[in-house]
């Protein structure tokens, strides 16, 4: 397992989590560090794959899949899920569920997934599915305090605030925008000149389209990084039940927690689900027993994440498994 990044590398990652397309000169100015140092460190982080910056459209409603596996088959099942192009993340769990994954599967495709595709997974005993009803936080919004509030604000000055980012089906994306989104998904730090070459548009047109897509929330830039490298070595999936009238209050509480990488409201008897990353087991205990959002929770389940095979739509590096 690779070690934790040092303080400056973590601050650079924190800046990329706020704006993955920010120039090294801008990041250096905001962090108060020499531009050459930030450029060298940043390029090394990207070149090694420790950090990958990707651009994705706003998420449509997904389906979360929990799989109970035959003993010893958890990684095999998770790998089969991760290999699907429509899988957003896939984790091996240390608990009754052997693995959990989110698949880009709208309700109209649910029968095909549940009846035909999941039963064909090798090593499957049984499965449970939950439809995402609302996203509380997606991983592109996770900012665990690696940089200070003033630095964060300096990097977000021209971006819409998170509450303005639309979720659900995104319509009206034309062919040129689709080409841009595809190019940015592979590498969201491509400069405008390279994007112009790929799409056949002028550099000025590409700049306008990228900025418009970002302002409208149709393009979400995220820095994908293993939380362990940032010092968050304990990761878990959490399911919570609340009275229907209290779901929104619990969701708002989860949205304020810096440990929460991802959270959503889901169908089923556990109306909320979250992925959390924390620095220690003690911190996880405090989160599960003393956090303010627990006041309106009537039942809680959790499972530690033993390994991640896919994160943010990208395969995890071998040392993250």
Image (spheres, rainbow, N blue to C red):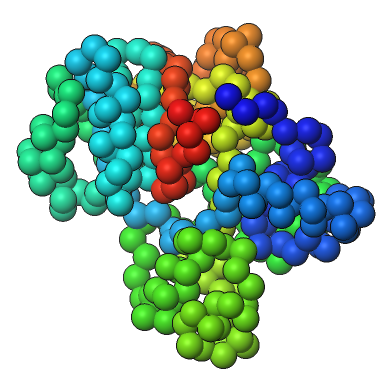
Residue at the left extreme of this rendering: 115
Front in this rendered view, residue 244 or 291: 291
Does 157 sit left or right of 215 as displayed?
right
Question: Residue 63: percent from the left, percent from the top?
Answer: 28, 41
Does 200 sit left or right of 231 as displayed?
left
Q: Is residue 240 above or below residue 274?
A: above
User: Can you tell which quarter of the image residue 300 is in?
Assistant: top left
Residue at the bottom extreme of this rendering: 202
Question: Residue 1: percent from the left, percent from the top?
Answer: 58, 24
User: Can you tell which quarter of the image residue 214 is in?
Assistant: bottom right
Kindly tell me whether residue 253 is visible in this rendering.
no
Residue at point 52%, 71% (across, down):
213
Does 259 sit left or right of 115 as displayed?
right
User: Can you tell which quarter of the image residue 132 is in?
Assistant: top left
Question: Residue 211: percent from the left, percent from the top?
Answer: 60, 74
Kindly tell me whether residue 82 is visible in this rendering.
yes
Does 262 sit left or right of 16 as displayed?
left
Residue at point 52%, 43% (across, down):
139
Q: Is residue 227 above or below residue 176?
A: above
Numbered-mark total: 0
Residue at point 20%, 15% (across, down):
70
Question: Residue 225: percent from the left, percent from the top?
Answer: 58, 41
Residue at point 48%, 61% (across, down):
186
């Amino acid at each position: 397992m690779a070690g934790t990044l040092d303080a400056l590398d973590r601050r650079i990652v924190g800046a990329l989590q706020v704006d993955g397309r920010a120039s090294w000169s801008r990041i250096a100015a905001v962090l108060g560090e020499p531009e050459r140092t930030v450029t060298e460190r940043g390029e090394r982080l990207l070149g090694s794959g420790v950090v990958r910056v990707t651009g994705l459209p706003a998420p449509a409603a997904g389906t979360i899949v929990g799989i109970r596996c035959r003993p010893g088959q958890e990684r095999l099942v998770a790998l089969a899920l991760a290999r699907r192009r429509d899988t957003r993340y896939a984790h091996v769990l240390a608990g009754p569920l052997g693995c959990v994954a989110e698949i880009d599967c709208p309700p109209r495709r649910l029968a095909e997934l549940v009846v035909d595709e999941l039963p064909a997974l090798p090593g499957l005993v049984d499965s449970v599915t939950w439809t995402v009803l609302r996203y509380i936080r997606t991983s592109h919004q996770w900012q665990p305090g690696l940089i200070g509030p003033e630095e964060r604000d300096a990097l977000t000055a021209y971006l819409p605030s998170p509450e303005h980012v639309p979720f659900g089906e995104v319509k009206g994306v034309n062919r040129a925008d689709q080409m841009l989104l595809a190019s940015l998904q592979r590498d969201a730090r491509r400069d405008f000149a390279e994007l112009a070459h790929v799409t056949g548009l002028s550099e000025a047109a590409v700049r306008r389209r990228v900025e418009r897509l970002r302002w409208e929330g149709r393009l979400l830039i995220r820095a994908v990084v293993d939380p362990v490298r940032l010092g968050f070595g304990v990761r878990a999936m959490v399911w919570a039940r609340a009275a229907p009238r209290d779901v929104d209050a619990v969701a708002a509480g989860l949205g304020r927690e810096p440990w929460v990488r991802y959270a959503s409201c889901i169908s089923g008897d556990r109306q909320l689900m979250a992925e959390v990353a924390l620095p220690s087991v003690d911190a996880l205990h405090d989160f599960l027993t003393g956090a303010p959002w627990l006041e309106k929770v009537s039942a809680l389940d959790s499972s530690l994440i033993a390994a991640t095979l896919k994160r943010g739509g990208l395969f995890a590096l071998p040392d993250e498994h």
